[in-house]
Amino acid sequence: MSTTWSFILQLATLILVLGLIYRPLGDYMALVYTSKKDIRVERRFYRLIGVNSGSEQTWPVYLRSVLAFSAIGVGLVYLVQRIQEILPYSLGLPPVEQGLAWNTAISFVTNTNWQSYSPELTMGYTVQLIGLAVQNFVSAAVGIAIAIALIRGLAARKSTTIGNFWVDLTRGIVRILLPLSVVAAIILIIGGVIQNFSGFQHITTITGAAQTIPGGPVASQEAIKMLGTNGGGFFNANSAHPFENPSGWTNLFEIVLMLAIPFSLARTFGRMVKDHRQGYALVSVMGIIWIVSAALLTFLEASGSGTASQLAGGAMEGKETRFGIAGSTLFATSSTLTSTGAVNSMHDSFTSLGGGLAMVNMMLGEVAPGGVGSGLYGILIMAIVAVFVAGLMVGRTPEYLGKKIGAREVKLASIYILITPTLVLVGTALSFAIPAVQASVTGTSMANTGLHGYSEVLYAFTSAANNNGSAFAGLTASTPWFDTALGVAMLLGRFLPIVFVLALAGSFAAQDTIPTTAGTLPTHRPQFIGLLIGTVIIVSALTYLPVLALGPLAEGLK
Amino acid sequence: MSSARGTTRQYWVALRAMIVLTAALGIIYPLVITAAGLLAPSQANGSLVTVNGQTVGSSLIGQSFTDKNGNALPQWFQSRPSAAGTGYDGGASSGSNQGTESETLIKAIKDRKAAIAKSDGVNPASIPPDALTASASGLDPQISPTYAREQIARVAAARNLSVSTVTTLVNSFVQAPNLGYLGEPTVNVLELNIALSKLAG
């Protein structure tokens, strides 16, 4: 079967499955976050941690809870890495070095899962389980909680509060992420993903050679890695490793896992603001961008342009036989348009324009459909900007879902949009502008030289600031500069936007809802869908075109 | 109510929450999944392959079929080039991460092409891309049916088997993609080579 047909049929399967999931999962999540009742295990948990689940928080208190929880998370993940050698199942590995431990702690708490290390050689099972996998759950639950708080703000009238963070966190884990992960992990085991504590087995092959077979509790981590759009591999090769992603069908299943919650949250949004058409508008924007981007990447990789690919007869460097081109490009698109960052093929070895497109996907702000929660609040910010732009054009006070978009709201949304580009551009520029840093970047870190080496650095900052976690993995990032700079980019790229989203949530919640009139811009029609897609593309194109021209564009169009 | 009690209290709540969640999600959850893995013990333990009671590999993890110096052994079907350690190192999965304009990669592909054309006695243009490129994991257990068929003449000659016998064997090991379209058709190299050794023996 040709790559084209394989792509079309796999895409159609994904659309069908995600379409079937959309309503039940979206409605269920809305129920989870609007229900007044706690289940027994939750009541026990609230007693243990000392929280009154009936109380509501103002946005500053909600924010402080998020920050406190995340700070404790960073501390704990840092600690377990530093004491690795005394933990059970450490596989004889030493403590993780300070800079790397700091970078990794931030990486997993911010839902980025950027990995400056090779897991097989660095992290024992206990660190993976109680450090990294726990953050896979909780960082995802934090992301969804923030999105829900913003939706509540939009749905509320003259309210001072936006919910209770501890309740949102708990329900996201107990009622959504954990049950789905259990089911997904078991399905993955049936598909061949390993789940054991065997360590490395040393065997003799039929030619008499020695080989190492790795072990590990992989399936339990793989499930939440994908479902929570985390992306941190148990192994260095991530979802390209046959023990993480053994076959064609597990590959499609993993793509479904990473897209299920982000797409379905649009339904949750529609239900909570009591207008499903608003949810359909957002999911249309997400879906259209996703489909077009996937088709474009498949076309670029199937064309196999570039010297090495031409010589080999196809762009198969860094791709697995069982996935082929279409299975690799669908995965890569879904991973970079969400905040997942898992890879089943090596983006560093993609065609020049194909690798550039993976970067563009992240530069769009990861809103199609984006990470769990972060995708929805990202697209809502873009919707606010789109409404504002439309308001300027017709000379009316912009409003969205009956909320006035005044000076305060536009300022908050604008600063939100500026944060990630600032981190990406400043980080990349400093990598080459500071002489000592430049020496380390070009001498130690870059695996490829020239334009492609520059692309590796640009990709790294794009990935970190957008909390994606994928890489042009040739880059050696375990240097003092990258451990520090990427750590800062991940931290600010995650929590600064959250500050502005929660401030917006508080601002909307305090407003009364104004009735729609004949002059109100409808935000559920194809016209608005087009406007929103345009806004997403124009904002990132204006910001990133120059830096893309220096790297992937220059290389691909040479 | 928690919202009224300041930041210190939030940290205290956060710490307790993190400890409980670590126990539940970091210890109990993976143990439950490990127990569930007993339903499919072969997969959970790595789809290991045994010959005469000896474990000789995993059907999911590719292997090298080379001598100690890394030279291809002509009597075995060859796997793809690998960037994992010194080749198919299960403790160091990795791709090459070389870009398509990389001089290193271009030279490697040229060298591989020349080596295969010589050892297999084939036209360089007929060698498929998977034979010339390293996979993403460095542990790709499979090759394309085209690459497997391209190696038939060499393997048959090295083992004194007829080309038709080896062709029949290769054809029986071609796996169609799941549902016919999820991925690409493949040949599992280790499984093929084990069957091959039984054929010869």
Image (spheres, rainbow, N blue to C red):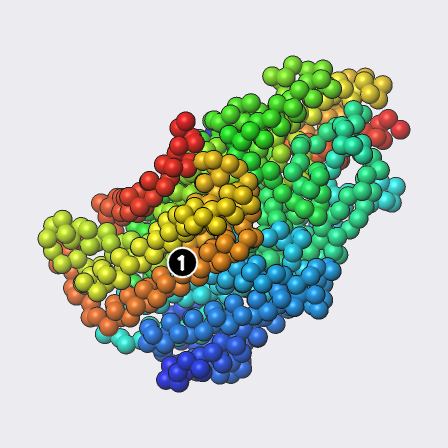
* Residue labelled with disc 1: A493
Q: Quadrant of residue A67?
A: bottom left
Q: Residue furthest front?
A: A435
Which quadrant is the N terminus of chain A positioned in?
top right
Residue A324 at x, y percent in the picture: 56, 34
For the point 54% across and 31% down, the residue is: B102
* In the depicted structure, whether residue A525 falls above or below residue A319: below
Percent of width and height locating residue A395:
10, 53
Residue B12 at x, y percent in the picture: 49, 81
The image quarter in which residue A60 lies: bottom left
Mark 1: amino acid: Gly
Q: Position of residue A101 (x, y in %)?
A: 57, 62
Looking at the image, residue A113 sits to the left or right of residue A245; the answer is left
Where disc 1 sits, the SS reads helix
Q: Give the vertical position of A37 relative to A352 (above or below).
A: below
Please indicate, yes or no, whether residue B36 appears anywhere in the rendered image.
no
